[in-house]
Amino acid sequence: MEARFSSASFAYRPNLSYLNAVEKIADFRDEGYVWVFDADIAKFFDNIYHGHLASEESTNIDNHLIQMQRRDDDYFQFQVSKAIVYGKLTNSKQLLMRFNRKRKIAAIEQAIYGISKDIDSLELVDDLDSLRGYEGITAARYFPAFGQLITNPNNDEFHDLALFVIIYLYCQ
C-alpha cells in the first residue's frame, strides 16, 4: 500500500511526521515553487457508511448517543460549521498579522482588514451556502497575501509558515 502514496503525502504514514512535510515544502520552495494547492476529498466520504464502533468498556456511551441524535439536527450542524469557519477565518487573520508585524506591507494590511470585516459579517449568516461564500471570499483575500509573505521568509518564519500550511491542509 505504501507504494501507492505520493512522495509528498505524509499524513498517517509510518515513520513520517510533520517534520518530513516541512522538509518537503522547503525543497519545493528551493525548486522555485510558490503556490500551494489544497485538495479536499471530504465529499468522497458522503457515500460511505459512517457507523461507529464501540467496545463494551466504553464509558462515553451517553456522549455517543447525543452525537447520534445531533447528526440530523440541521441547526446544530450549522452552528458547528459556523464555529469552524469562524476559527479558520480568525486563524488566517492572526497568521497574516503575525508575519506582517515587522514588514508592514500595505496589501497584507488590506487583506487583514477585509478578513476582519468577513469575521464580523459571520454574525449575519443564516445558511450554509452563505457561510461557504464567506469562507471562499476570505480564502481569496488570504492566499494572495500569504503568497507575498512567503516570497522571502527567514528560516524561523518559513518553519512557522510551513507548519501552518501543513496544519491547515490536514484540517481541511
Image (tube, rainbow, N blue to C red):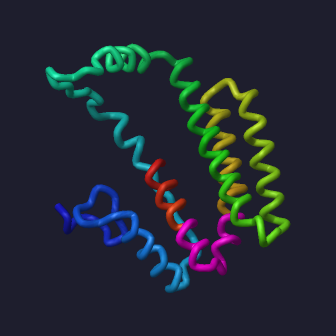
Give the quarter of the image for residue 98.
bottom right
Task: Provide residue 148's location: percent of width, then percent of height.
Answer: 70, 71
Task: Provide residue 95's location: percent of width, then percent of height.
Answer: 66, 58
| Prevailing secondary structure of the magenta residues | helix
Task: Provide residue 20's location: percent of width, then percent of height.
Answer: 37, 71
Residue at 14% over, 20% down:
56
Q: Would residue 40 be found to the left or right of residue 62 on screen?
A: right
Q: In front: 155, or 166?
A: 155
Any magenta on residue 159?
yes
Residue farthest to the left, as pictured: 56
Residue at 66% over, 80% down:
152
Residue at 37% over, 35% down:
46
Q: Is residue 25 above or below residue 18?
A: below
Q: Which residues are magenta?
A: 145-161
Q: In front: 165, or 56?
A: 56
Task: Provide residue 159's location: percent of width, then percent of height.
Answer: 53, 71
